[in-house]
Amino acid sequence: MTETQRTLWIRHPLACSDDAAAGGVVVQGQRIIEAVPAGHRPDAHVDEVFDASAHVLLPGLVNTHHHFYQTLTRAYSPALDKPLFPWLTSLYDVWANLDEAQLALASELAMVELLMSGCTTVADHHYVFSGALTHAIDIQVETARRLGVRATLTRGSMSLGRDDGGLPPQSVVQDETTILDDSQRLIDRYHEPGDGAMIHLALAPCSPFSVNRELMEATARLAETNGVRLHTHLAETEDETDFCRRQFGMRPLDYLDACGWLSDRTWLAHGIHFDDDEIARLGRAGTGIAHCPSSNMVLGSGLCRTLELEAAGAPVGLAVDGSASNDHSNLAEEMRQALLLGRLRYSPETLSHQTVIRWATQGSARCLGRTDIGGLAPGQQADLALFRLDEARFSGAENPLAALLLCGAHRADRVMVAGHWRVTDGMPRGIDLEALMARHDAAARRLRHAL
């Protein structure tokens, strides 16, 4: 019997996010082939058993928005205590000095940090390209493949620099032809269509205040031609709304719609400042929202109307955002933040821990255009996160599933991606974490001192 034919029963978890899999799941190859009811044994033949009686079982968490390179500028003094636009202008000149070695370390650390938090699918929005950093997405693909994580990697772009009324320095602005040609190259080389894909490519002009309209429109056409998704920041702050009114004569969502982006091919980072009519339009279009609670709090950007968006039909997923506005890459901790921040807007009866877990799994998968991840049903990918409750913070907890959020779970004990264990005993397999952190910290110091 080949390795891909062998079956593994994740047996009788302490708790499970899906009642239909309360007795665990059976994995064969890279897929779940059976969800086992509570108190039952599998119908399928089982070759191996993993005793999950001390673990809470979730589908692998799915992160919908990040900026891996920002792990190099966490808690950066010149950017502290500032809202979005001043925060960005404090950091753009630092990021303009990124090189490929630094990005490789930043991407590896961010993916490892996510993986350790129970995240099995990562998404990154990289838009900083300069003379020293032209193959950023290629580097990220290589890193994701080596670590064995699923990744949606977006070819970001900036075409509107300071000389033309934008925020970024001219050194990281590219022309439309260069951006579109490289986007096509990356799609042709790396994008994997179909179920079970490990690498997806998407196209992601940075924001309304860093790209021109021609690039937005051309990118939408290119994405449709190639069958890939679209991503950008939108409606993050009132400053952005004011900018769009001055620059384009319309609100951010109207501008997005005018550029051909308002569709179910698109998911948006933040999505805070939408009115009732705009929420209805997003829902009708099926446009997804990557909710970034910690970043929204750090930058004082506002409260995303998550429940209204979801009720209207817009998929809502969860994201850590970049590590310079969070400042971590931990999706388990982000679930707790989403719950607590949401309770400032919604009553406890309407926003539960189950809601937030759904955002971090099924909702996030929908934002990325995937139905093969985010759940525990037979046929879905064997992406699993298992958490133990043996730390002091969990002592006395009666509801294990709720305890993950209310008591602050931050590290998974076991993580499986496509049927392979990638984290065991809380540590990433095949990674010298201490050595990686030392190299990453040295790269961060070198980047800061390049100014």
Image (cartoon, helix red, strand yellow):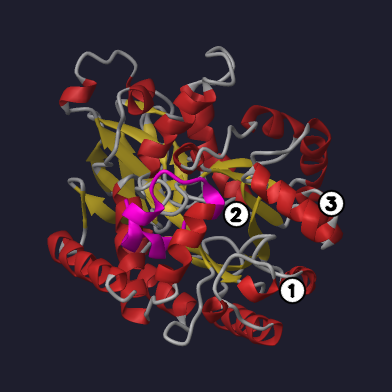
Q: In which quarter of the image is residue 364?
A: top right
Three-letter amino acid code of the residue under disc 3: Met
What residue sits 13% from the left and 60% below the top? 434
Residue at image mark 1: 215
- Quadrant where the N terminus sits is bottom left
> Residue 306: in sight, yes or no?
yes
How far is disc 3 from disc 1 in space, using C-alphas?
18 Å
Residue 49 on image: x %, y %:
25, 42
Q: Which of marks 2 and 3 is in front?
A: 3
Q: How crowded is mark 1: few (under 14 residues within 10 Å), some or many (20 or more)?
A: many
Q: Which of 305 and 317 is in front in this view?
A: 305
Measure how far apart labels 2 and 3 are at the Cα level.
27 Å
Q: How crowded is mark 3: few (under 14 residues within 10 Å), some or many (20 or more)?
A: some
> In the rendered image, which residue does mark 3 sit on?
250
Q: Is residue 122 above or below residue 307?
A: below
How far apart, in angstroms, are the residues tagged by discs 2 and 1? 22 Å
Q: Position of residue 43 (x, y in %)?
A: 42, 37
Region in magenta: 66-85
| Mark 2: secondary structure | loop
Q: Residues within 10 Å of mark 2 (few under 14, many from 20)?
A: many
Question: Which residue position is annotated with label 2?
Answer: 368
Q: Where is residue 415 in the image (x, y as percent from the top left)?
A: 31, 48
Query: Residue shown at 57%/78% (left/top)?
Result: 170
Instruction: Give left or right: position of 355 versus 11.
Output: right
